[in-house]
Image (cartoon, rainbow, N blue to C red):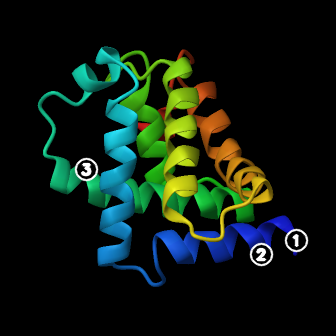
Amino acid sequence: MDLDTRFEASYQRVIGEGVGLTELGRNFFERFYENFFGTSEEIRAKFANTDMSKQVQILQKSMYHMVSFYLLKTESAFLRGIALTHNQDHLQIEPHLYDIWLDSLLLTVEQMDPEFEPETRLAWTLAMMPGIVYLKFYYSRPIPAEFE
């Protein structure tokens, strides 16, 4: 099985199909945040005043745009917005936090995907890295005028 197919199959097993947030997806994202918040006080502090129900929906949408970026190699207005709001001048989501985010995501996939294998981890990593690199790239750079 190629890695794109492996990723897609795993994604459907842990998040579900379609555009809306399924119960399966909600369970996945809630588990992700449990894992993510368990990593450090720094992470928990970043979400101290966050409506987590809304945040789960935002993460679901973000994942969709990160996967699209991986597949199409084209940024979306949504992903540009995330880059803008997460940079050093706004939410200050420092680059190292994306590595923790990815580790927490991969742990969640391992916990939730009954068919998880080491290649599944690789497939998810490859699918998420272009978006993560994109967000890290814009952390300390001036945001182009068209972003504002």
Query: What amino acid type should be assigned to the residue bearing mark 1?
Result: Asp
Q: Is residue 145 above or below residue 80?
A: above
Which residue does the image show at 67% across and 34% down from the upper left? 133
Residue depth check, mark 1 versus mark 3: number of the one nearer the observer:
1
Distance, label 3 to label 2, CA atoms, is 28 Å
Q: CA distance from mark 2 to mark 1?
A: 5 Å
Q: Position of residue 115 (x, y in %)?
A: 65, 70
Q: Residue at x 48, y 83 (%)?
A: 17
Residue denoted by label 3: 55
- Would you say the residues marked 2 and 1 are in contact, meaning their CB atoms lie under 8 Å apart? yes
**SS under mark 2:** helix
Quadrant (top left/top right/bottom left/bottom right) for the C terminus: top left
Instruction: Provide the secondary structure element on which disc 1 rests.
Output: loop
Mark 2 = which residue? Answer: 5
Q: Which residue is mark 1?
A: 2
Q: Is residue 102 above or below residue 12?
A: above
Of labels 3 and 2, earlier in sequence is 2
How far across and down, in percent of the image, does residue 88 sit?
Answer: 42, 16
Mark 3 and mark 2 in contact? Answer it, CB < 8 Å: no
- The residue that appears at 53% across and 30% down in the rendered structure is 98
Identify the element where label 3 is drawn.
helix
| Front residue of 12 and 98 | 12
The picture quadrant where one finds residue 21 is bottom left
